[in-house]
Image (spheres, rainbow, N blue to C red):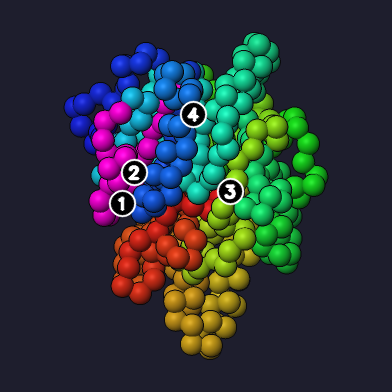
């Protein structure tokens, strides 16, 4: 069933009773992958029984909605948002629509194996048996399409780490090495496959919508810890993540978004002096790399660095630069206001390819 966010309709499903688990998938111009994942989930017996439901939140995609998502059917709802507010806004819309006790966020570009929902519900039994000692957030294991482990857990950003990361390969910057991961407490887990206790959602009000994409899950995990909730990693349940951002070249537009997310995180969650040092570092980076891009005739790259420099200046002056503004700023680099969200797509779906404004919510 399709609901338009903000309408008078109440999107909470009642036909099968209260679900135990709601799977939230945020879509933007990625209908084929979203449709594929939803079909996999609805094929699981736990969807038929009403124990699990799927909520797809669309961030104002263009094009036709696949019939399999638009047609009313038990265990599935589609919420259409009027604009692309980013990953956090989409997740929050999904959370608000359900009365389930647990939420599982999945990227559209993940693949599950048969029995996945049964394994997740088994984990819920174990978590609930721990009573008040249970974690509020659990990240499950990710694998690359070739079967190798994929990074999905990170340490909270610090000034030293953030500067050091600029001098190591990008695929190793954000996440801890997969071989180093062990089950148990961690700082934060990726939003590509994240299990969240509904009680924590009610306490926090959801993810911070000032982020357009990236670092919103880091901020959410940090807030959970401040409120006394643990974050844990459980590699015993796994999905395949097909297009993580760290495995792909980053575009000039996405560079604007990622710099904003990092700076916003520092301004909101770390000492003020650390934000200002990082901002100065990014300003210097913008000047040097922007000049080099201009010299090489890379107009879009040069424009991105100019946009970043202006954004840094606003943040240093104490102005508010929300994610939606950054989306428009990045989109304007090629004259198009549309930008992929909540995740940058893989190359075949780039929203800034010539003559096209597509893209998909992929790539954590």
Q: Residue furthest right?
A: 180
Of pointers 1 and 3, the one earlier in the residue sequence: 1
The span from disc 1 to disc 2 (Cα, nearest Å) is: 6 Å
- Which SS class for mark 1? loop
Please name which of the two marks, 1 or 4, marks the residue nearer to the observer: 4
Q: Which residue is mark 3?
A: 241
Q: CA distance from mark 2 to mark 3?
A: 20 Å
**Residue 208 in the image: x percent, y percent?**
47, 39
Q: Secondary structure at mark 3?
A: strand
Q: Residue at x 39, y 32 (%)?
A: 55
Horizontal relation, residue 235 to residue 94: left or right: right
First reached walking from the N terminus: tag 1 or tag 4: 4
> In the rendered image, which residue does mark 1 sit on?
61
> In this orientation, does residue 24 appear?
yes
Name the mark nearer the viewer: 1 or 3.
3
Q: Position of residue 19 (x, y in %)?
A: 43, 18
Regarding mark 2 in the picture, which secondary structure is present there?
strand
Q: Quadrant of the N terminus?
A: top left
Magenta-drawn stretch contains 340? no
Magenta span covers which residues?
Answer: 52-73
Around disc 3, counting alpha carbons within 10 Å, would you say few (fewer than 14), some (14 to 19), or many (20 or more)? many
Q: Which residue carries the number 4 mark?
A: 44
Q: Which mark is in front, 2 or 3?
A: 3
- Mark 3 and mark 2 in contact (Cβ < 8 Å)? no
Residue 134 in which image quadrant: top right
Q: Are marks 1 and 2 in contact (CB under 8 Å)?
A: yes
**Residue on which disc 2 sits:** 58
Q: Position of residue 39 (x, y in %)?
A: 42, 38
How many numbered discs sit on the rendered protein?
A: 4
């Amino acid at each position: 069933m399709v609901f338009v966010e903000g309408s008078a309709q109440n999107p909470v499903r009642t036909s099968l009773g209260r679900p135990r688990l709601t799977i939230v998938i945020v879509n933007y111009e990625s209908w084929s992958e979203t449709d594929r994942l939803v079909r996999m989930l609805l094929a699981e017996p736990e969807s038929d029984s009403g124990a699990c439901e799927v909520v797809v939140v669309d961030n104002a995609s263009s094009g036709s909605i696949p019939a399999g998502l638009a047609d009313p059917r038990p265990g599935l709802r589609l919420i259409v948002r009027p604009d692309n507010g980013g990953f956090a806004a989409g997740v929050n819309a999904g959370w608000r629509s359900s009365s389930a006790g647990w939420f599982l966020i999945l990227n559209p570009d993940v693949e599950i194996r048969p029995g996945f929902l049964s394994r997740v519900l088994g984990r819920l039994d174990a978590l609930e048996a721990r009573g008040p000692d249970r974690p509020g957030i659990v990240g499950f294991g990710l694998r690359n399409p070739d079967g190798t482990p994929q990074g999905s857990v990170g340490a909270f950003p610090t000034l030293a780490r953030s500067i050091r990361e600029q001098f190591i390969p990008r695929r190793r910057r954000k996440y801890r090495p997969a071989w180093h991961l062990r089950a148990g407490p961690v700082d934060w887990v990726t939003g590509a496959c994240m299990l969240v206790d509904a009680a924590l959602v009610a306490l926090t009000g959801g993810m911070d919508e000032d982020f357009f994409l990236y670092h919103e899950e880091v901020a959410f995990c940090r807030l959970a810890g401040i409120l006394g909730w643990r974050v844990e990693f459980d590699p015993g349940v796994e999905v395949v993540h097909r297009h993580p951002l760290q495995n792909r070249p980053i575009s000039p537009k996405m560079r604007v978004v990622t710099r904003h997310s990092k700076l916003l995180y520092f301004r909101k969650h770390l000492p003020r002096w650390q934000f200002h040092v990082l901002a100065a570092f990014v300003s210097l980076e913008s000047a040097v790399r922007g000049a080099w891009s201009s010299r090489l005739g890379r107009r879009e790259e040069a424009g991105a660095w100019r946009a970043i420099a202006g954004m840094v200046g606003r943040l240093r002056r104490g102005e508010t630069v929300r994610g939606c503004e950054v989306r428009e700023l990045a989109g304007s680099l090629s004259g198009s206001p549309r930008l992929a969200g909540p995740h940058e797509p893989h190359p075949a779906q780039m929203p800034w390819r010539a003559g096209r404004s597509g893209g998909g919510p992929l790539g954590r």
